[in-house]
């Protein structure tokens, strides 16, 4: 893999970890409000949806009570990694993209002459 892909993957893991920590801190230390609960629930939804495929009845599925919370945290973390990876790849794509009439584009210089 090239250097950009490695650094993008590492940055997406770091941002996903920061997102997970910030969501946990917000749930713990922010005062109760309906807006706070809605935001935290929206950020926790991807993990709950993925784990719902494994444990369809939630914590009441067999040994689900023991592993359901861990599975939700892990799947939320993976969803955050994928989200940040896609965002960083798009950001880098638009930063490195050359326009047709850009002065640094060698093909444009040849056609202008």
Image (spheres, rainbow, N blue to C red):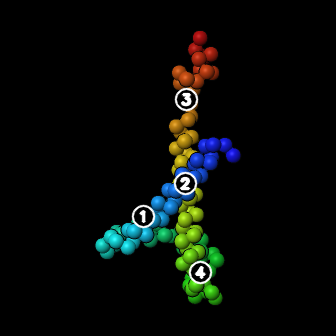
Which element type, helix, strand or loop, lies under badge 2?
helix
Q: Where's the C terminus, which quadrant?
A: top right
Q: Which residue is mark 4?
A: 67
Tell me which label, 2 or 4, sits earlier in the chain.
2
Q: Which residue is mark 2?
A: 12
Tell me which label, 2 or 3, sits earlier in the chain.
2
Q: Is residue 24 above or below residue 113?
A: below
Q: Give the image quarter of residue 63.
A: bottom right
Disc 3 and disc 4: Cα gap in Å?
51 Å
Tell us which disc is closer to us: 3 or 4: 4
Q: Is residue 82 above or below residue 75?
A: above
Residue at the spot 57% in from the left edge and 52% down from the top edge: 10
Residue at the spot 42% in from the left edge and 64% down from the top edge: 22
Disc 2 and disc 1: Cα gap in Å?
15 Å
Count of number-bearing discs:
4
Q: Give the image quarter of residue 81.
A: bottom right
Bin the neighbour count of mark 1 within 10 Å (Cα to Cα): few under 14, some 14-19, many 20 and up: few
- Is residue 18 in view? yes
Residue at the spot 55% in from the left edge and 54% down from the top edge: 12
Q: Is residue 112 above or below residue 9?
A: above
Callouts 3 and 4 close, C-beta under 8 Å:
no
> Where does residue 32 sit, x and y in percent of width and height?
31, 75
Disc 2 and disc 4: Cα gap in Å?
25 Å
Q: Which residue is mark 1?
A: 22
Callouts 2 and 4 close, C-beta under 8 Å:
no
């Amino acid at each position: 893999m090239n250097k950009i892909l490695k650094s993008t993957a590492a940055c997406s893991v770091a941002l996903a970890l920061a997102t997970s920590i910030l969501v946990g801190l917000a749930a713990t230390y922010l005062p109760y409000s309906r807006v706070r609960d809605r935001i935290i629930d929206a950020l926790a939804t991807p993990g709950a949806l993925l784990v719902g495929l494994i444990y369809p009845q939630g914590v009441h599925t067999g040994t689900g009570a023991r592993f359901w919370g861990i599975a939700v945290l892990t799947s939320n973390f993976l969803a955050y990694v994928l989200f940040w990876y896609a965002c960083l790849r798009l950001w880098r794509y638009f930063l490195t993209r050359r326009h047709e009439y850009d002065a640094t584009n060698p093909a444009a210089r040849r056609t202008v002459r």
